[in-house]
Amino acid sequence: MRTLIQNGTVVTHAGRVGADILIEGEVVVAMAAPGSHDWTADKVIDAAGKYVFPGGVDVHTHMELPFGGTYASDDFETGTRAAAWGGTTTIVDFAVQTIGEPMMDGYEAWRAKADGRCAIDYGMHMIVSDVNDQSLKEMDILMGDGVTSFKLFMAYPGVLYSNDGQIFRAMQKASENGGTIMMHAENGIVIDVLREQAIAKGQTDPIYHSTTRPPITEAEATHRAIAYAELAGCPLYVVHMSAKEAVAEVAAARDRGSNVFGETCPQYLYLGWNNLKEPGFDGAKYVCSTPVRNWEEEHQEWLWKYLATNDLQVISTDHCPFCMNDHPTLGTQKRLGEGDFTKIPNGLPGVEERMRLIYDGAVSDGRMSLERFVEVCATTPAKMFGMYPKKGTIAIGSDADIVIWNPEVTSMMSVDVNHMNVDYSCYEGKEVQGKIELVMSRGNVLIENDTYLGKPGDGRFIERDTNQYLI
Ligand code: URP
Ligand code: ZN
Ligand code: ZN
């Protein structure tokens, strides 16, 4: 099968150019000035007036994550289909080790959930919940299987939390085997004290989820994680950053020349305390950790600035949806925390909305160039997690993961038009500039004419290389 995409403006992190793209099977085989060739193809797609972007790469999703007595409501089938609708053609999800169990069991369980069900290509990070001698050996085995990044938690004591010694041991192992440590950097011990005290005072509403996780708890943990990573000599990628004080720690480490990186997510750029304070129990929709923060403290403006200066390198989603009212089997998940915010499952939906939200806020609102938009949403995540240049760019030899984007029209964010398996959108009614007209994954058209043409199992597991973004 040969496909020709012609007359579009091809945008990569490196620049933009009017070009025709020839795809043979799954990969890009040629690019040339529009009309300067005599290529024939089985399918010809006219992209005149459109942008041709590499497919989005979302390196932080949680399909079916068990959390707080329930499960994230998107599974690998529904979640990756929704990702495709939103112009994302690669995800990296998180396999979870159960405390007391071998890490490989967790990994195999997650592969069993994902294999044969995904609409788009997918990789796995490994959540190390129980750092011990066996887990450290298993980190080596996983490296050989293309699982080259390991997430640790300084939050959620008693569940996913690792203490400082465990964190440091895992970092030493990563330094030895070339892995990247991903860190959920919040001081969970202090946060637990603040949560208990808030509940004792009758502060039970969703807003207290954020007031009990103040910026200093993120900044202190980030500082500590960086110190240990610098001592161990491993790359550190701090996930879902929301506090400007925490990102300042990443910026300082980068200024010292350390391999320290930061990720933020759309919710931290767009949402805040006004959302958590929505009437009734609606604030629960926005409960995630790290929390969305007080708008008046200007975290959002600083996150945008840090993205522009490359102190933050990646925008992912941390997609982890739970229903408010209405899931056929999982029920009213967020309402588990009605009357006690500590019981609200942490996480919110976003895998389908990221590309359009960021294009709108970054490119349309003049905060980023088109190239930087591609870089933070596709190219850098692909490099950071060892998938470049197959993923994250459009070049000869790359996988033909391509999004055709109409910049002239607007589209709507709404649960009514979304495809994620969740009963609300955090951005309900928001109109954004740009519409996704076609999505292709390894040459296979998944979305065209507002129709999904893919099927479960189209997506393939990616055995990832080590970090390609190191200084
Ligand atoms: O609130 C969040 N972020 N839920 C998902 C789990 C995690 O910490 O990433
Ligand atoms: Zn986390
Ligand atoms: Zn997460």
Image (cartoon, helix red, strand yellow):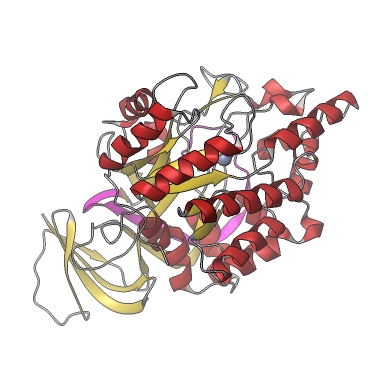
Residue 433 visible at all: no
Q: Quadrant of the N terminus?
A: bottom left
- Based on the picture, tell me whether residue 431 belongs to the magenta stretch: yes
Q: Position of residue 76 (x, y in %)?
A: 38, 33
Q: Position of residue 389 (x, y in %)?
A: 28, 62
Q: Nearer the viewer, residue 469 or 178?
A: 178
> Residue placed at 19% from the left, 68% from the top?
396
> Which image quarter: residue 299?
bottom right
Relative to 453, is 63 above or below? above
Residue 439 visible at all: yes
> Residue placed at 41% from the left, 43% from the top?
173
Q: Position of residue 452 (x, y in %)?
A: 33, 43
Residue 468 located left or right of residue 63:
left
Q: Nearer the viewer, residue 425 or 188?
A: 188
| Segment colored magenta | 417-446
Q: Nearer the viewer, residue 131 or 465?
A: 131
Q: Quadrant of the C terminus?
A: bottom left
> Residue placed at 46% from the left, 39% from the top?
419
Residue 179 located left or right of residue 249:
left
> Residue placed at 12% from the left, 79% from the top?
37
Question: Hey, which residue is sitting farthest right in the picture?
Answer: 201
Q: Position of residue 13 (x, y in %)?
A: 39, 71
Relative to 354, is 329 above or below? above
Q: Nearer the viewer, residue 183 or 54?
A: 183
